[in-house]
Each structure stands twice: as structure tokens, then as C-alpha cells.
Image (cartoon, helix red, strand yellow):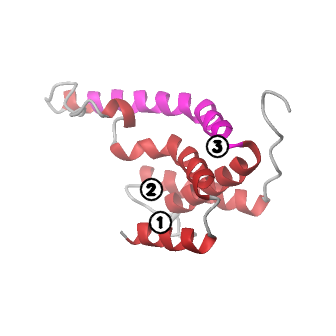
Amino acid sequence: MTSEGPPATAREASIERLRLVAMFEIVAFHTLDGGRLPVIAGLGLPTFLLLSAAFSVVSADRRGPAFVAGLKLRKLGLAWLFWCAVYAVVLSALAVRHGAPWYAPFHTPWMLLYGPRIHLWFIPAAGSISAYLHAATRHLDRHVISLLWLGIGGC
């Protein structure tokens, strides 16, 4: 076993294509004034997160949740910080343009944890959280887990 851990398994090309379409749908939503790709009609983000979490869980079975979390941090952490900084500069510039102080978009210190918009935290965290949750609950009966997550999802 190298410092990179066991090798990754091959991924199904059709699933990767679905993930790519989901990414395009997310970009379309953010760039086309809420426009959607008719192929998946607004389900880009849920599809992308579901597939990413599933891949993280499969990887955690082989490599362990700590390895998956470290890999996510290395792969996504720097890019996430970069885009949070870019987004923060854009928000500050827009605030100044509209006569507000540059710091107006940043209303809470918690933003240091999740970025300039509260929904951005899950991008780097979803896979790691899924891997740890899977490791913590894998000994439980799958029916119990299914009912538990259905209940949580319903709430």
C-alpha cells in the first residue's frame, strides 16, 4: 500500500456522463438566470451530490473515511477557498457599487466556515460526511438505516 492508499476502482462511464450532465445543469442554472437543462430539469445539484456521496461511500469501504476526507480536502479544499475568495470580491464590489460598505455582504463570522453564501459549505464537505456516516452506521441493519434516512429526509 502506497501513501496514496489502495488504488481507486474503475468508474462506470454512464454514471460519469450523468455526473457531467448534472454539472452542466448546475452551471446553466447559475449563468442563465435560473435556466435549466431540459435533460434533467433542475435535478442537477441533487444528482451531482447523490453520485458524489455514493462514490465517497464506495471509496470509504476500500480506503477508509479518513483517507476519503483527506483526498476531498486536497482535491476540493484549495479550489473551494479560491472560488470563495473570488465570490467574496465580487460581492464586495457589488456592495460598493450600490453604495454599501465593502463588508456589507459578510454579516456573520460564521461565514469563515462556509464561505460567502451559506449553501457553499456542502460542496467540499458532502463526500467526507457521507464517508464517515457510512463507516459509523455500516454495522446496523440496512432496513434500520433505510428507515432512519427516510425519516431524516422527510423532516
Q: Residue sitting at 79 percent across and 27 percent down?
A: 3
Name the residue beneath numbered marker 1. Answer: 42
- Image coordinates of residue 134 in percent, x first then y, are 61, 55
C-alpha gap between disc 1 and disc 3: 30 Å
Q: Amino acid at mark 2?
A: Phe
Of the two numbered discs 3 and 2 on the same chain, state the one appearing first in sequence. 2
Given residues 16 and 54, the one toward you in this image is: 54
Q: Secondary structure at mark 1?
A: loop
Name the residue beneath numbered marker 2. Answer: 29
How many neighbours does mark 2 have within 10 angstroms: few (below 14), some (14-19), or many (20 or more)? some
Q: Secondary structure at mark 2?
A: helix
C-alpha gap between disc 3 and disc 2: 32 Å
Q: Residue sitting at 66 percent across and 35 percent down?
A: 71
Q: Amino acid at mark 3?
A: Pro
Name the residue beneath numbered marker 3. Answer: 65
Residue 137 picture quarter? bottom right
- Image coordinates of residue 65 in percent, x first then y, are 64, 43
C-alpha gap between disc 1 and disc 2: 8 Å
- Image coordinates of residue 74 in percent, x first then y, are 62, 30
Given residues 154 and 144, the one toward you in this image is: 144
Q: Which residues are magenta?
A: 64-93
